[in-house]
Image (cartoon, helix red, strand yellow):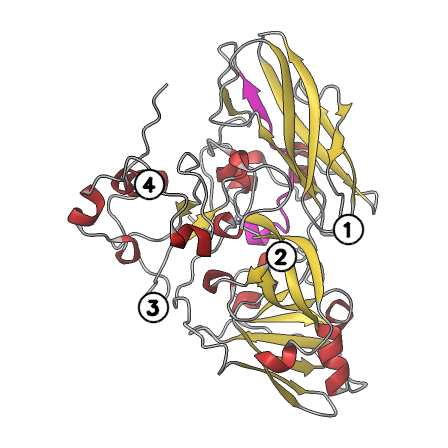
Amino acid sequence: MQVKRPSRRRFLKKSVAVAGLAASPPALEVSASAVEAPPPAVIDNNSLDAVLYGRRSRFVTITREIEGRSHSTTPRIRPTPQRPSARTPLAELVGGITPTSLHFTTQHYYGIPDINPDEHTLMIEGLVERPLVFTMNELRRFPVVSRICFLECIGNRPSPRAETVTGTHGRMGCSEWTGVPLSLLLKAAGIKNSAQWVIAEAASGGRHTKSVPMAKALDDVLVAYGQNGEPVRPDHGFPLRLVVPGFEGIYNVKWLRRIKVVDQPYLSFQEHSRFLTPNQKTQQDSYEFGPSSVITTPSGGQRLSGSGPQVISGLAWSGAGVVTGVEVSTDGGRTYHQAELAGPVLPKAHTRFVLPWHWNGEEATLQSRCLDEKGQLQPSEAEYARYWDLTRGQLYGTIQSQLGHCNWVQPWKVGRDGKVTNGLAPVDVVVDVHG
């Protein structure tokens, strides 16, 4: 069978269509002559640029999926937005590590800064004995640590309107992060007895800041300059970012320039504009994600080729630590079967699970649930709504950041024709923090 490589123009059109847009945002505009030029019939895998920085096969065309307020006619909620968000194509990944170029990235309303690492510094100040300023070279003199952990945006949520697993859970990824434990830098500065929190600040135009409890800062937080074996890329925080394993993605401050040690949390924009509510069940001191899982194969948008042997596969994770088990149901949750945890099972990291399944050609509803080392079991949609005293309509009509961590079960329905669709019943309204 002849394989035709999609042109850049068709790729851009497809990306825009996925986001529900009518035209390209400024960051994606390309001249007509550039996109209409036909690609070479054969790519030279022996060329110098291919040797200097390896590239994937021309038959592999996986990309991130564009989303969010990226169209020029969409009302702007910040000055000069520069780029859209992009979600991880979970259904097309293998293993547990997300390639850096496919790792989700959120919209940056003030743009991505172009930082010269030779001029960049990190300041440690506040309630410390010795305020310090580190250059990048000085940071590299500290003992190096690598940790594999997931990053997930609080905007992730199962949704009756999503057609694919990228639509429901694509705002997450899992990488190997390399850098210096924040605890070593705080120790070098000398923490005063009254110190209870640290405030991390970015060098971006918006000066994004987040408060992190001191107990967490001294535990497993990294000041990272590496991701998946190379320097952190600009849209992931080059040259320096904070990595807070298991916590909401927004705590992992990019383009890190300052750590201020304080005696109480600061109510920065991101900590009071959406994340604090009158509902007492929204715990202001609960930051780590609970147990989650989702089936990526078969999942929405895919089709089974025929009845017979199949393999159900997906990802499980928990901000509380290690995934201890994943159960899979093929009958909509009436019965469950223990799945195999494939590959390394690491704390606060994506864990791949698999379950052999014989499809008899009849309708089936597939779903998974995760158990973590704290004994927490991933809830069903009904259990989650009941906890919050909400109807289904209210559940999906509430912005994600006001519901805590939306980790309920996402089912997929397999039709007799093998087509896989969303297994959640429809609702009238779905509010999305990134919509």
Q: Where is residue 181 in the image (x, y as percent from the top left)?
A: 72, 70
Question: Quick one: label 4 or label 2, which is nearer the N terminus?
Answer: 4
Query: Tag 1's secondary structure?
Result: loop
Quarter occupied by residue 343: top right
Residue of label 3: 79
Q: Please report the residue visible at 38 percent of the width from the left and 66 percent of the height from the top.
A: 111
Q: Which of marks 1 and 2 is in front?
A: 1
Label 2: how many residues lie within 10 Å, few (<14), some (14-19) or many (20+)? many
Q: Which of 423 and 396 is in front in this view?
A: 423
Image height check: is 113 above or below 8? below
Question: Quick one: label 3 or label 2, which is nearer the N terminus?
Answer: 3
Q: Please report the residue visible at 46 percent of the width from the left and 26 percent of the height from the top.
A: 301
Residue of label 4: 20
Image height check: is 62 above or below 190? above
Residue of label 2: 248
Residue of label 1: 321
**Are the residues tagged 3 and 4 within 8 Å (C-beta)?**
no
Q: Please report the residue visible at 77 percent of the width from the left and 71 percent of the height from the top.
A: 218
Q: Which amino acid does label 2 sit on?
A: Glu
Give the number of callouts.
Answer: 4
Label 4: how many residues lie within 10 Å, few (<14), some (14-19) or many (20+)? few
- Residue 356 part of the magenta segment: no
